[in-house]
Image (spheres, helix red, strand yellow):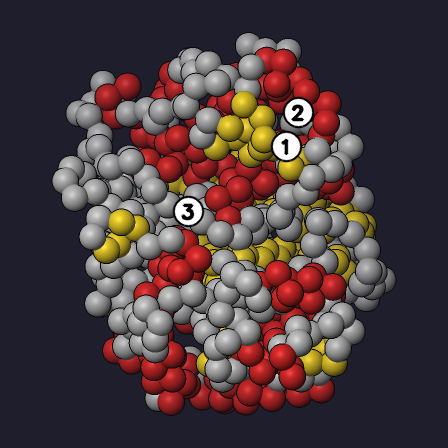
Amino acid sequence: MLKLSMSYKLPRYFIYLCSLVCANACAGSNALETQGSQGWPHGSMAATANPHATDAAIAMLEKGGHAVDAAIAAHLVLGLVEPQSSGIGGGGFMLVYSRDDRSLVFHDGRETAPAGARADMFMSDGEVMNFLQAWQSGKAIGTPGAVALYKQAHDAHGRLPWVDLFQPAIVLARNGFEVSPRLAAFLPRLKDVSRLDENPGSKEYFYPEGEPLQVGYLRKNPAYAATLTRIAGEGPSAFYEGPIAQQIAQVAQAEPDPGTLTPADMAGYEAKLRPVVCGDFAEQQICTTSLPSSGAAQIMIAQLYEQLRSETSSHIFAYVDAQRLAYADRDHYFGDPDFIEVPLQQLLDPRYIELRAQDRFAPNELPLHGDPRLRLGQRATEQYGIDTTIEASGTTHLSIVDKEGNAVSFTATVEAPFGSGRWVEGFLLNNEMTDFAREVPDEGPHPANVIQPGKRPRSSMSPTMILDGDGELLMVTGSPGGNSIPAYVSKSILGVMAWDLTPEAAIGFPNIIARGQKVRVEIGVEQGPEIASDLKAEGYQVQEREGENSGIHLILVTDNGLVGAADKRREGTVRTTK
């Protein structure tokens, strides 16, 4: 039975809101092991999407900082060196583990819809605005949540002074960083599909003298340094009130397709504490973020896999069908719990998982959502309209464990690559409103993820940790990747916990995304072509892809120390403290 609890003792199957707890380097590697010393015997480690960010995290850890301090410092750097993925103009979800009392806290810094937002704001005369137009519009900009999330998490867990966390990013912005291959590769491709090379500020920054930044170019960002200096000195009010907030609203309201974001929306933003959701798997506990994230889908996929694996000799077929069922339920029901009723307790009820695993959709059929309440003998669940959400993949993830065994799993985003492409004082604004269902019917029920003022769009982000039965940390994981995130993260969990793979092997295993009627298989890595061939032979509609957009960063706790790995599909690194 699922229940809410303010204490932490890890009973089987429950959702709980944890109490708020106040208060040698290998920069170019994709995998790393380390040992600790007294107390927490496993050492400390950081895995992020860029070596500069990993260095910033390590600097905070070596100063005695909490994992949260390291995560904030790292993300501030990522906003500079990896602006295509996240930044202070966006938001994120942070899952924090405190070892002293085995507690977990979920900090929700997801963007919110402006007060002037409407369910049909991306529609005209019954037609939905195409994604490229919506992506670059002012309508797409939601109230950013990252800075408020920083403050809430730092107040609860931070050890170092607030101002210290900003220094690595400020120094790097002033002195400059060398443009990475991944950042440089995006820019030529975006010239034909975005306004990044046309919008004031972004065109000068990313396309100096009209040409895209090249690999190795020393890119300075004094405006970003100035913005961070203000926030470091004045706190979040420097961002959510005054000149910066006014400029954000002005840019959001600019043509083409102006939005409605106002200074009042900025001033009214609040980060939230949400329940952490846990579920049994392989004698361990998967603990993850609740709604509006898709963390609960990690529990559903793993537990459905357990049920289905007992009925088939193929772990791949079981994994694919577990995804198909979980995605169908997630797409239909998940959304902002402050605005809609989500039967999450029933969706995670082991009785429903067992019954749901018996649903037999042929490999070439479209899997449909179930009704967990009806299946459990309760009143039928409120039925929402067909989900029309389309998510892009401009996101990042970092995993950190500090010297005391505290941990952070932090996924952050600006939604699509470079967000809305609109620039304010050295950073980009998100296009998070396109994470809502943009198409709504004239009649009948709306999708659960429909736009409403103040609402947070459903997110695929799933920062996750694995704990043992005593509440001790075993693993920290997460990934970017848009609506493929549930698949990417579940692969890392099953890879380590069920398939006996090392962290590096689990991350490198072919990505398989089984959402809807088609199964996407990454054939550009070893075993991918064989998996695709086996699925085709079974009758699945397979879509072959040379590469995938995962960016998994994983830390595993072992008897011999921490083992960390970064996804080679991006530019991540793993480091430990000295």
Q: Nearer the viewer, residue 404 or 418?
A: 418
Q: Quadrant of residue 417?
A: bottom right
Tell me whether the residue at label 1 lies in contact with that at label 2, contact meaning CB atoms closer than 8 angstroms. yes
Q: Which mark is residue 390?
A: 3
* Extreme-left residue of the structure: 443
Taking 83 as reference, is 268 left or right?
left
Give the residue displayed 40% in from the left and 69% down from the top: 144
* Mark pair 2, 3: CA separation: 25 Å
Task: Point out residue 447 in the picture as x, y percentages from the top left corner.
Answer: 26, 42
Q: Type of residue at label 1?
A: Glu
Q: Quadrant of residue 78?
A: bottom right
- Position of residue 564 relative to residue 71, above or below, is above
* Mark toward the start of the polypeptide (3 vs 1): 3
Quadrant of the image containing the N terminus: top left
Q: Type of residue at label 3?
A: Ile
- Position of residue 364 relative to residue 547, above or below, is above
Answer yes or no: is residue 40 visible: no
In this figure, which residue is indicated by the disc labeled 2? 532
Give the residue displayed 23% in from the left and 18% down from the top: 377
In this figure, which residue is indicated by the disc labeled 1? 544
Q: Nearer the viewer, residue 140 or 32?
A: 140
* Mark pair 1, 2: CA separation: 7 Å
Element assignment for label 3: loop
Task: Point out residue 539 in the picture as x, y percentages from the top left corner.
Answer: 56, 15
